Amino acid sequence: MTTTDDRTSGPSGNPIPGPVIRLDGITRWYGNVVAINDISFDFQPGVTGILGPNGAGKSTLLHLMSGFLQPSSGEVLVFGESAWDHPDLFTRLGLVPESEAVYPFLTAREFVTISARLHRLPDPEAAARLALDRVELGEAQDRPMRGYSKGMRQRAKIAASLVHDPELLILDEPFNGTDPRLRIHLMQLLRRLAAEGRTIVFSSHILEEVERIADEVLVILNGRLAAAGNFHEIRRLMTDRPHTFAVRSSDDRLLASELFKEPYVAAVSIDSASGLEVRTTDFSAFSAAIAGIIHRSGVTLNELRPSDESLESVFSYLVRK
Amino acid sequence: MTRALILLTARQLAGRRRALFLALLGLIPIFVAILYRFAGDHMDPPPVEFTPEMLDNLVLAVVLPLIALVFGTAALGAEIEDGTAIYLLTKPIERWRILLVKIGVATAATLALTLPATLIASLISLGGDDPYGLTAGFVLAVAVGALAYSALFVALSIRTSRALLAGLVYVFVWEAIVPTFFDGTRWISIRQYMLGLADLVSSAPDAALDADLSGGAAAVATVILVVLSVWFGTRLINRFEVGERL
């Protein structure tokens, strides 16, 4: 986890005392259901990814951070002030919601210009032009948004959230529904914004998205903080865990006996219906050696697949750790 | 900033089909006045009795509340329903200011469709002869009623996604039917406030226009209702949480 007494600076160069966002033991209940359970974390400038399966509580956490939900207990501080009931924060904060909804009757240029006016910017047209240039919406910016694809709407929403040049940008599942080209463009944009000194917080349920751009990661599972910190440390935790493979061959017993000879194979179980289940402590070594083992034992391989690679199983492992 | 919010809300309310439907609704009193004036040889009842009855039963009881209901619930409630309200709420604008602009634009849109219709229908049905100041009385009543209904329906639309249904029940059950059984409900009826104000300005005899509330009481009740609606709406929008409806 990051320390809490750092002094950092925003894009304007002004020092920000303490973390940009501080979550201090926040819990949020919906009736009898706990959506967020006692999470504490400090966010600093750079890109922080909030990773978790659908329904884990990522959106709830982002809504708490942007002041759209009141914590049941604990405190959310943004730039040192309570996020709840504090609309002034939006002079320094931009939010890109997950919802695709936009004003269908407005063009993206009108939408972003109106956002600039509502922020009381001195030159709204120029600010809108700059923000739209950043998302590369092209000629589509002068067409009503009712005809926009999901990706175009996403660009318009991001432009509207950037128009006032915020120090903190919060994005809820920003890559959902985007094509690969737009995804790469958005990732580069977020990295660029972070390099300018901004704090970028985004949520995703795709491990690879977070891996590509996040410096820090919060892994959320069932409303709890399963892991937090530098992405590489978390990734190592994920890759160092025992991996399970499902294997089917022409002679499962013979293959099992050959596999047992390898030092990185922790366990092999045989099921007459589903074949072998192999647990290995070294994913890379097993992957590199399996072809040779099969060749050596003279069996025919019918199926080989990792059986516990779903994000949920990775998260479950982290929680157990 | 306020201008941008006004223009955005006005464009939201000016959806073609909705505006056309409501404009046609607003024309009904004029058609009825024309029918009364020109369709028969004998005008029975006389214009000073027919006009307030027509304006009360048609404009105050149906046309005005329906138009105010559609505009009032669309001004902010529709944005909350479709999720676009988040673009307003993520701006450094005091929430009460957003609410006041929404009420103001809904009122203006309601007035644009009901005030000219009331004026023209009254002038036609009276044939230009208005000894008791009925036209002025009903124009004032419609102006105040548009504000009161808009404030109530905008606040209601923040509270519930079924504001349109709740508004219909209020207009066609609470205001239209309940007062016939319970006299005290006139104190919670915008229609009765409007009649009281029309009666205050007009000098029509009781046979033509007889309100249940005095003009002063109607004015005070209207102010209280508008203030309460703004207070309630501000409180709701200040404590608005995204997870539930956005």
Image: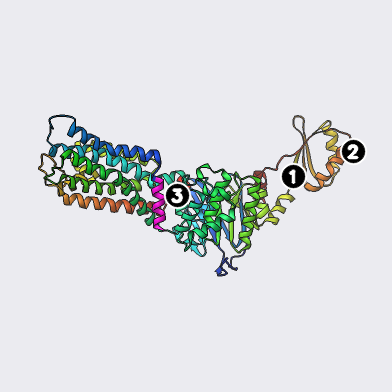
Query: Closer to the camera, A63 or A104?
Result: A104
Mark 3, residues whose alpha carbon is within 10 Å: few (<14), some, or many (≥20)? some
Of the image marks 2 and 1, the number of the one nearer the N terminus: 1
Residue A106 relative to residue B63: left or right: right
Location of residue B72 (image quadrant) = top left
Secondary-structure class at tag 2: helix
Magenta span: predominant SS is helix
Q: Same chain for the residues at labels 1 and 3, yes or no?
A: no
Which residue is denoted by mark 1 in the rendering? Answer: A243
Which residue is denoted by mark 2 in the rendering? Answer: A296
Which residue is denoted by mark 3 in the rendering? Answer: B85
Q: Chain of mark 1?
A: A
Question: Quarter holding the N terminus of chain B?
Answer: bottom left
Residue B52 relative to residue A122: left or right: left
Residue A234 relative to residue B209: left or right: right
Give the colouring mode of the picture: rainbow
Q: Same chain for the residues at labels 2 and 1, yes or no?
A: yes
- Confirm whether the magenta stretch covers residue B67: no
Q: CA distance from mark 3 to mark 2?
A: 65 Å
Residue range (magenta): B1-12
- Confirm whether the magenta stretch covers residue B7: yes
Q: Which mark is residue A308?
A: none
